[in-house]
Image (cartoon, rainbow, N blue to C red):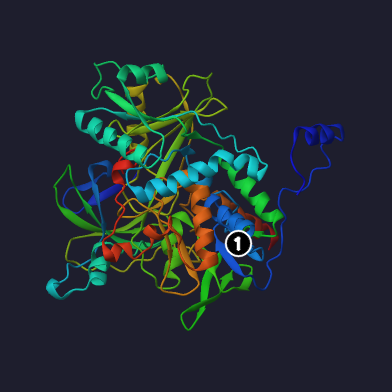
């Protein structure tokens, strides 16, 4: 892999930029691999990268039915934070946050990581108490978190409306200064390039149509480009987790819903941090291009269409107007939906399954992006060793039988 | 946005309705003999079908009655509305050719749609 650097940019510039390598190869599928990862999103490519880099498993493939990063990796609002309430969640999301900090350097790819701070607003007494509790829980877990009163919120984020006249006035909020946003394509391409350089085959436009087993063990997959033999299959397919598990008659506690987002026309810098409000129900940040990136809750119905309903967006816009009347004349440019698979306890599934050699990473619901490096890191560990590590263990499927749920609905940025 | 044909009130905007999840999950009897795994199956496990799916809706701002609906979750087409206790009617739906594929209309997945066009051009 040719390293990207300022010097290399100048050198290639002098040559008319004709000497750059392809960022990743376009290989033909081999007849067999040591492991196959289904799903070429951020989580899947991160899993492949860490499998190759940390566990020496370089004879592996990532299969993707569309193009890499074309699913939820390309459809989320890229918000990074780790201020979750419970120990189990703090462990995995903070693990991810720590990896985010050095990821651009590690991958030698500009992921445009911006630790600009994430505000979670409180609009009533109950929410204030709950968020203050979360600040203390976060601090005990080593997650950076602090409480700001309304004036301090206004100082940190001057464009916000803290007037007492609105229906749900801003009473205060929590701030995670290490939180922020990054560039989704940069992360996907960075992981893909680094994994490819370690020998991982990235097979795009290759759809899995079946998973082969013998005597309760995985032996391979059927794809639209032929059969691939492998003893280990790892599903990292976000909204389609149930579809993959159904191929092996494994029942999962997830439901897939559309989650919509939209962006405004680009404007000059006005919003310096990420603002999230559970009660008023919207989250918003400004991209480096100047567009406001806005999201809120899921559509209630189960769907795989990657489209949602207009009333959800109307509600989202009304909420944004309440917090930022200054945005009232902005036009919205694009709107889209992704399919998120939501677990009953709003925590992910990172687990072995009853079928030996079949692993599931999914159920991230509405908050998977922030976990990308941490999720890939611990999932690679699980696939390589066939045992979950300390961070992954609480997220096994059997928690729905034992009752040891990690109920994180309260820490979702907005209610779903 | 959906227009849902409520069996009691007629066609209304979806925003009047509340989604109530997968239909035809019967509450178990003899619960005192159930294992934890059986409880998990009843309480948590869901079919999460991509394709023709029977689900419950509640007309929250209308008649306030529950009813069942048959919808294609790969296209969002509504195929039938029927009352609680009735069996779902037989319908034909536009289903994806493969388990994870996309139907010919109704999908917002451009990555897969473009692949299909390329394939068409090549064939």
Residue B115 placement, left or right of A412? right
Report whether residue A325 is seen. Answer: no
In the rendered image of this protein, does residue A405 appear above or below residue A327?
below
Left or right position of A53 against A244 = right
Up the image or down, A268 lies above or below A97; here it is above
Foreground: A126 or A285? A126
> Where B105 sits versus A177, above or below?
below
**Would you call the spot at circle 1 few (<14 residues within 10 Å), some (14-19), or many (20 or more)?**
some
Image-quadrant location for residue B74: bottom left
Question: Residue at position x 41%, y 45% from top?
Answer: A367
> In the rendered image, which quarter is residue A250 located in?
bottom left
**Percent coordinates x, y for residue B17 in the rendering:** 23, 46
Residue A231 seen by the camera:
yes
- Residue A290 position within the rendered picture, expressed as x and y whole percent measured from the top left: 54, 25
Instruction: Name the residue rendered at 37%, 35% in the picture.
Output: A313
Residue A22 is situated, as x and y percent measured from the top left of the image, at 75, 48
Q: Which residue is mark 1?
A: A55
Q: Nearer the viewer, residue B67 or A194?
A: A194
Residue at the spot 41% in from the left edge and 48% down from the top edge: A91
What kind of element bears circle 1? helix
Residue A216 in picture, x, y percent from top left: 46, 80
Vertical comparison of A28 with A212: above or below: above
Figure disc tally: 1
**Chain of the residue on which disc 1 is drawn:** A
- Quadrant of the rendering where the C terminus of chain A is positioned: top left
- Residue at the bottom extreme, as displayed: A215
Hey, which residue is sitting farthest right in the picture? A15
């Amino acid at each position: 892999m040719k390293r990207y650097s300022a010097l290399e940019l100048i050198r290639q510039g002098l040559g008319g930029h004709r000497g750059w390598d392809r960022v990743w190869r376009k290989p033909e599928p081999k007849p067999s691999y040591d492991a196959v990862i289904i799903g070429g999103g951020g989580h899947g490519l991160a899993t492949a990268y860490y499998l190759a880099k940390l566990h020496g498993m370089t004879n592996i493939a990532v299969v993707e039915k569309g193009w890499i990063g074309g699913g939820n990796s390309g459809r989320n609002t890229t918000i990074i934070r780790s201020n979750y309430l419970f120990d189990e969640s703090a462990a995995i999301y903070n693990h991810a946050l720590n990896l985010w900090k050095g990821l651009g350097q590690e991958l030698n790819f500009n992921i445009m990581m911006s630790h600009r701070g994430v505000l979670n607003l409180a609009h009533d007494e109950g929410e204030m108490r709950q968020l203050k509790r979360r600040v203390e829980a976060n601090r005990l877990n080593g997650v950076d978190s602090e409480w700001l009163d309304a004036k301090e919120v206004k100082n940190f984020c001057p464009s916000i409306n803290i007037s007492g006249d609105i229906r749900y006035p801003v009473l205060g909020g929590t701030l995670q200064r290490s939180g922020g946003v990054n560039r989704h394509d940069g992360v996907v391409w960075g992981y893909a390039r680094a994994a490819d350089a370690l020998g991982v085959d990235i097979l795009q436009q290759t759809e899995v149509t079946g998973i082969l087993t013998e005597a309760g063990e995985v032996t391979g997959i059927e794809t639209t480009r032929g059969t691939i033999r492998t003893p280990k299959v790892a599903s990292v397919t976000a909204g389609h987790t149930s579809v993959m598990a159904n191929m092996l008659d494994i029942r999962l506690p997830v439901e897939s819903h559309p989650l919509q987002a939209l962006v405004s026309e680009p404007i000059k810098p006005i919003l310096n941090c990420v603002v999230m409000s559970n009660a008023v129900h919207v989250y918003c940040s400004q991209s480096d291009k100047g567009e406001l990136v806005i999201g809120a809750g899921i559509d209630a119905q189960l769907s795989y269409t990657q489209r949602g309903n207009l009333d959800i967006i109307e509600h989202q816009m009304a909420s944004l107007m309440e917090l930022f009347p200054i945005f009232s004349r902005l036009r919205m440019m694009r709107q889209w939906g992704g399919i998120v698979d939501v677990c009953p306890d709003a925590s992910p599934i990172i687990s072995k399954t009853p079928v030996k050699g079949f692993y599931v990473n999914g159920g991230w619901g509405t908050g998977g992006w922030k976990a990308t490096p941490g999720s890939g890191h611990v999932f690679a560990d699980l696939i390589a060793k066939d045992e979950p590590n300390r961070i992954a263990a609480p997220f096994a499927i059997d928690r729905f039988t034992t009752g040891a749920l990690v109920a994180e609905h309260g820490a979702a940025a907005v209610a779903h | 946005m959906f227009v849902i044909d409520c069996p009691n009130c007629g066609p209304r905007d979806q925003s009047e309705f509340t989604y109530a999840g997968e239909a035809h999950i019967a509450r178990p009897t003899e619960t005192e003999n159930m294992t934890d795994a059986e409880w998990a199956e009843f309480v948590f496990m869901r079919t999460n079908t991509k394709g023709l799916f029977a689900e419950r809706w509640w007309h929250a701002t209308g008649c306030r009655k529950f009813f069942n609906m048959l919808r294609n979750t790969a296209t969002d087409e509504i195929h039938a509305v029927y009352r609680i206790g009735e069996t779902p009617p037989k319908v034909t739906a536009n289903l994806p050719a493969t388990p994870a594929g996309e139907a010919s209309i109704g999908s917002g997945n451009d990555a897969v749609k473009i692949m299909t066009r390329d394939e068409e051009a090549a064939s």
